[in-house]
Image: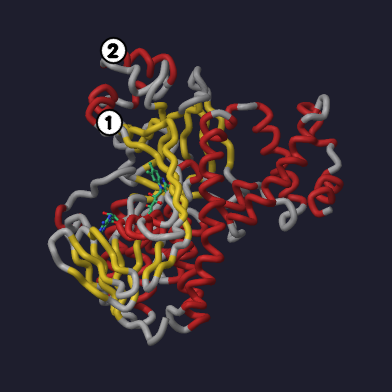
């Protein structure tokens, strides 16, 4: 790959494409984004899937690199833990990490809006209503539905889980690709503010109603509403398919999510009017072909149960920008390092996210899980650099995801052994914490 790159195209003005464009523009590249949709800022509506997202350390670190962390945190709601709602409506607050650690509920539309504004302020041109259909890799030429073709020095596919760039790569030799839908889908429901204009439930938590094979969750919004998401099987005895009438929905929710029902005044209407969406994991390699590269969901779409899709996409941007600093321009050495670093981490967070569905919908309500959290909290307090719970490695640290998964597996094996000791429920304080940590390091 020869010659200095000057003109860069990005497919997709989503969260990742917009952030990447700011980083590249700040380095002096001439950046144009091509976005399939119309400008959501002109339409005045913040539409699309999942209204709010959990933003955590990796995402914030990338935003900090372009000076936007503080501005974005101003419009976030901190969630220091999960609030578990059992069948009877009893509540159990479980902190996510140490005192002072929290994840942030942020509006997807608001964040995307701000990133697009910021991109334009740095000279990025965003061309809306440009749906890419095909890409020529060597000339970095994108062909659009409106008949236009645009060439540049380099092109990124930040065009999401059903990426057109990846679609073009899929037609080439030695391109590895897999996609897997899980059997559950999701539906969003609204929990409005109370008549007094307050939050209907505690805003300082991500709420979970774990029910084994399915769950309801809720994240707070700045307007004091909550966006609830029901993750639920598509088919089967308990499923979207099985709830056919308003009476079915009412009876089911009264049985399983009793304390939420009075707070969901539009439940029946929303249940039938709001879309039911599917959840996919996409893995592929390579992420680079000719003068093009994949980034964000286009490279690694994951299920949302670790709250890491956007965060990992932002981390892709962070790593790419660090590599630009090191290599000076987009060249073969940079692109090799980008893939070598990020493909294993994309695969690792895809695995972790699938695993966390089981943890969220099932394990958080389990006594052994709660006990493990208690023991791990103690271990982390005693040996903060040596024992870091898996959730904290993923959410509050810079450990590579692939490293987190390897360390997490090792820690889990040690925990499984400790938790299997007779009487541990009443005796966890008497564990030899030093021996446990030595086991990990040994
Ligand atoms: P996208 O956000 O999908 O953006 C892609 C953009 O490309 C879009 O604007 C699209 O219109 C455009 N585009 C698509 N095709 C074309 C084309 N052919 N030509 C031109 N433009 C095109 N992540 C978290 O970190 N925390 C969370 O809490 C979290 N919660 C989630 C909850 C749910 C229910 C879901 C579904 C996802 C969640 N995620 C979360 C994941 C997060 O939404 C994604 O990882 C993130 O949006 C990826 O950003 P992206 O820019 O790569 O892709």
Compared with 357, 390 (above or below) is below
First along the sequence among labels 2 and 1: 1
| Disc 1 packing (10 Å; few <14; some 14–19; many ≥20) | few
Is residue 166 visible to us here?
A: yes
Compared with 158, 308 (above or below) is above
Question: Residue 247 has which mark?
Answer: 2
Q: Is residue 250 left or right of residue 204?
A: left
Q: Residue at x 50, y 28 (%)?
A: 210
Judged from this view, the residue extending furthest toward the left is 146
Residue 436: image x %, image y %? Answer: 82, 45
Q: Is residue 43 left or right of residue 324?
A: left
For the residue labelled by badge 2, is the local secondary structure a helix, a strand or a loop? helix
Question: Residue 266 has which mark?
Answer: none
Q: Contact, CB < 8 Å: mark 2 with mark 1?
A: no
Residue 94: image x %, image y %? Answer: 58, 37
Residue 142: image x %, image y %? Answer: 25, 67
State the quadrant of the N terminus.
bottom left
Q: Residue at x 23, y 25 (%)?
A: 269
Q: Quadrant of residue 8?
A: bottom left
Is label 2's Cβ within 8 Å of ligand 1? no
Q: Quadrant of residue 170?
A: bottom left
Q: Residue at x 20, y 55 (%)?
A: 37
Judged from this view, the residue extending furthest toward the front is 173
Q: Nearer the viewer, residue 334 or 213?
A: 334
Q: Residue at x 29, y 63 (%)?
A: 11
Residue carrying label 1: 195
Residue 362: image x %, image y %? Answer: 55, 28
For the residue labelled by badge 1, is the local secondary structure a helix, a strand or a loop? loop
3D distance between C-alphas at marks 2 and 1: 26 Å
Q: Nearer the viewer, residue 341 or 119?
A: 341
Compared with 380, 272 (above or below) is above
Q: Quadrant of residue 95?
A: top right
């Amino acid at each position: 790959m020869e010659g200095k790159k000057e003109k860069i195209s990005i497919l997709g003005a989503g969260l990742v494409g917009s952030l990447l464009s700011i980083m590249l523009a700040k380095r002096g590249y001439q950046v144009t984004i091509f976005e399939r949709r119309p400008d959501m800022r002109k339409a005045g509506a913040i539409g699309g899937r999942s209204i709010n997202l959990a933003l955590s350390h990796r995402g914030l670190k990338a935003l900090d690199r372009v000076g936007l962390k503080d501005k974005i945190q101003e419009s976030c709601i901190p969630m220091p833990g999960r609030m578990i709602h059992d069948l009877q409506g009893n509540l159990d607050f479980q902190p996510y990490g140490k005192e002072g650690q929290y994840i942030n509920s942020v509006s997807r539309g608001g964040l995307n809006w701000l990133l697009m504004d910021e991109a334009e302020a740095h000279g990025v041109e965003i061309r809306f209503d440009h749906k890419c259909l095909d890409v020529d890799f060597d000339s970095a030429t994108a062909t659009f539905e409106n008949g236009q073709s645009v060439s540049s020095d380099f092109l990124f596919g930040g065009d999401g889980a059903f990426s057109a760039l990846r679609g073009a790569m899929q037609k080439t030799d030695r391109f590895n690709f897999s996609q897997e839908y899980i059997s559950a889908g999701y539906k969003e429901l609204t929990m409005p503010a109370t008549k007094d204009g307050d939050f209907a439930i505690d805003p300082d938590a991500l709420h979970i109603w774990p029910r084994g094979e399915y769950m309801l969750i809720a994240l707070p919004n700045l307007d004091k509403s909550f966006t609830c998401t029901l993750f639920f099987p598509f088919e089967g005895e308990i499923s979207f398919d099985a709830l056919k009438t308003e009476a079915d929905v009412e009876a089911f929710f009264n049985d399983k999510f009793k304390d939420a029902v009075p707070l969901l005044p539009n439940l029946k209407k929303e249940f039938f009017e709001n879309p039911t969406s599917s959840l996919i994991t996409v893995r592929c390699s390579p992420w680079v072909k000719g003068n093009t590269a994949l980034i964000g969901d286009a490279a690694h779409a994951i299920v949302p149960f670790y709250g890491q899709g956007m965060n990992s996409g932002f981390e892709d941007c962070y790593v790419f920008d660090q590599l630009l600093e090191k290599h000076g321009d987009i060249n073969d050495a940079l692109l090799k390092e980008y893939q070598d670093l990020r493909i294993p981490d994309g695969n690792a967070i895809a695995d972790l996210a699938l695993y966390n569905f089981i943890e969220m919908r099932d394990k958080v309500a389990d006594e052994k899980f709660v006990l493990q959290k208690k023991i791990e909290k103690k271990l982390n307090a005693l040996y903060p650099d040596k024992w870091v719970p898996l959730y904290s490695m993923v959410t509050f640290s810079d450990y590579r995801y692939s490293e987190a998964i390897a360390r997490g597996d090792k820690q889990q094996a040690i925990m499984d052994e400790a938790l299997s000791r007779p009487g541990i429920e009443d005796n966890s304080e008497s564990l030899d914490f030093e021996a446990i940590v030595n086991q990990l390091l040994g």
